[in-house]
Amino acid sequence: MIQKIACLIASLLALPCYIFAQEVPLLGVCANLDKSAVVNKYDYAFIQPTVSDALQPLQADSIFNNGEKIKKSDVKVLAANVFIPGSIKTTGPEVNEQRIIAYATTVFKRAQSQGIPIIVFGSGASRMIPEGFSKDSAFKQFVSIGKSWHP
């Protein structure tokens, strides 16, 4: 019994050392790039804009302008969310896999060129299953599209 108590006390004493030895996660804010000054003012580590705000994948390269909006950000852009807009369906009868692949290729190319390592899928409107459409078929479409991005 004394050994168990001693072991418990040793564990409790070691716990703060373990906790403080761990790297604290970065705290960022989901916001458009035009809010980066405010995000910086309050000492957040990064900003997470939408893909459409930061990478403008539906715009020509000349409009994207080599990521000038990202370069002007007052804080790092470590991720972008809402990967696919609601206008591009990933489930249902309107799915156009070639359009999705072309769109994703543009997103990944621009994200890589700007040093953005994380794209968050989210995209609720894009992946919403239309009423009357088979959930099983929608799941298979979604998986197929996801697999098309990986070698």
Image (cartoon, grey):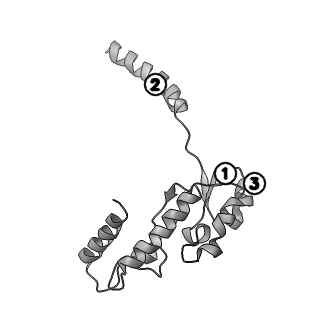
Would you say residue 105 is visible in this rendering? yes
65 lies above or below 72: below
Residue annotated with mark 3: 41
Q: Which mark is residue 44?
A: 1
Please report the residue visible at 44 percent of the width from the left and 19 percent of the height from the top.
10
Residue furthest toward the top?
2
Give the residue at x 50% y 56%: 118
Which residue is pictured at 57% across the width and 72% down the height?
Answer: 52
Residue 149 point in image, percent of width and height: 37, 64
In the image, residue 148 lies at what x, y percent?
A: 34, 67
**Residue hosting label 2:** 12
Residue 141 occupies which quadrant of the picture?
bottom left
Depth check: give the residue in front, 100 or 46: 100
Which mark's residue is nearer the viewer, 2 or 1?
A: 1
Distance (Cα) linking label 2 and label 1:
32 Å
Q: Is residue 149 shown above or below 16?
A: below
Tell me the kind of residue under disc 3: Lys
Q: Earlier in the sequence, mark 2 or mark 3?
A: 2
Element at label 2: helix
Q: Sort mark 3 into few (<14), some (14-19) or many (20+) by Cα contacts within 10 Å.
A: few
Q: Earlier in the sequence, mark 2 or mark 1?
A: 2
Distance (Cα) linking label 3 and label 1? 8 Å
